[in-house]
Image (tube, rainbow, N blue to C red):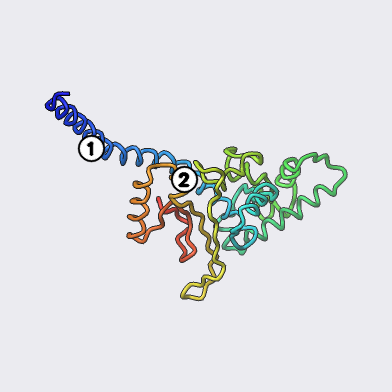
Amino acid sequence: MNTNLILRTLLVLAIVALSYFCISSVVTPIKFEQTRSEREVAVIKNLVAIRAAEAEFKIVNGRFTADADSLLYFLKYTPKKEVLKEGSLTDKQLEAGMTEARAARLMRAAIARAKSNKKLDLPTIEDAYAYVWENDREIKAQGLQGFRRDTIYNNMIETVYKGEYTAQTIDQIVVIPYTNGTRFELEVNDSYTTSQGIHVPLFEARAHYNTYLGDLNNQERVNLIDKETKLEHYPGLKVGSIEAPNNNAGNWE
């Protein structure tokens, strides 16, 4: 084979290889960041859902939980307690010493009196309120027509997530997307006390880059982790903090 032809062929191959590596060095980081951004939308969605669940758990139990199964059980089987409010007290009523609690007690007593009167046909609670507002002397004397405070219990999942999840799909919020079923790390700190001596329960839910980016370019992932670590940032996505109160914010917010 002609020596010049061999040299030309090798030169072409070298140019092709160099071009490939140059293009790859540009395209790989861009593709990595695009895929990372797409995946983090799903990861953040689940972290926000976990944050909402932890907030409800704390309202009922006075603490957070690091047990994902306990959190899911809570969502599925604990009703959401809410107060149905209608009407409000006037400034004049408040100045006279009327309070929300006292008004609610007066209303409950009036409703009980109405329901105990067998002569009255009050098939629903709405009928009972309508009758009391119009006819009960105590309620009229106190100016509480239209005032209503009822404790109601709703489905926790439907109330908190507005139909986005059901009892059959809620389990997915504790699983990190784009993994083979890996769950978020949940951690709590029940011993944190502020400088004023106030006890503040803390929680944190997190997903390391190695979990949801584990199948992407290894060098790009290593570089990303190294960058965040040097900045003293968590190398991944997380919500809340076990080190200090942060209003349960996410590190992307």
Q: Which residue corresponds to the image point at 41% horizontal and 42% vertical from the top-left? A: 216
**Residue beneath label 2, please?**
212
Say left or right for 14 vs 98.
Answer: left
**Is residue 141 shown to the viewer in this render?**
yes
Q: Amino acid at mark 2?
A: Tyr
Of residues 88 and 34, which is closer to you in this image? 34
Say left or right for 220 vs 17.
Answer: right
Check the image and report above or below for 155 versus 2.
below
Residue 222 tag number: none
Q: Amino acid at mark 1?
A: Cys
Residue 252 drawn at (x, y percent): 40, 50
Number of marks: 2
Query: Local crowd at mark 1 within 10 Å, few (<14), some, or many (≥20)?
Result: few
Residue reaching furthest right?
118
Q: Which residue corresponds to the image point at 37% horizontal and 53% vertical from the top-left? A: 225
**Residue beneath label 1, please?**
22
Numbered disc 2: secondary structure: helix
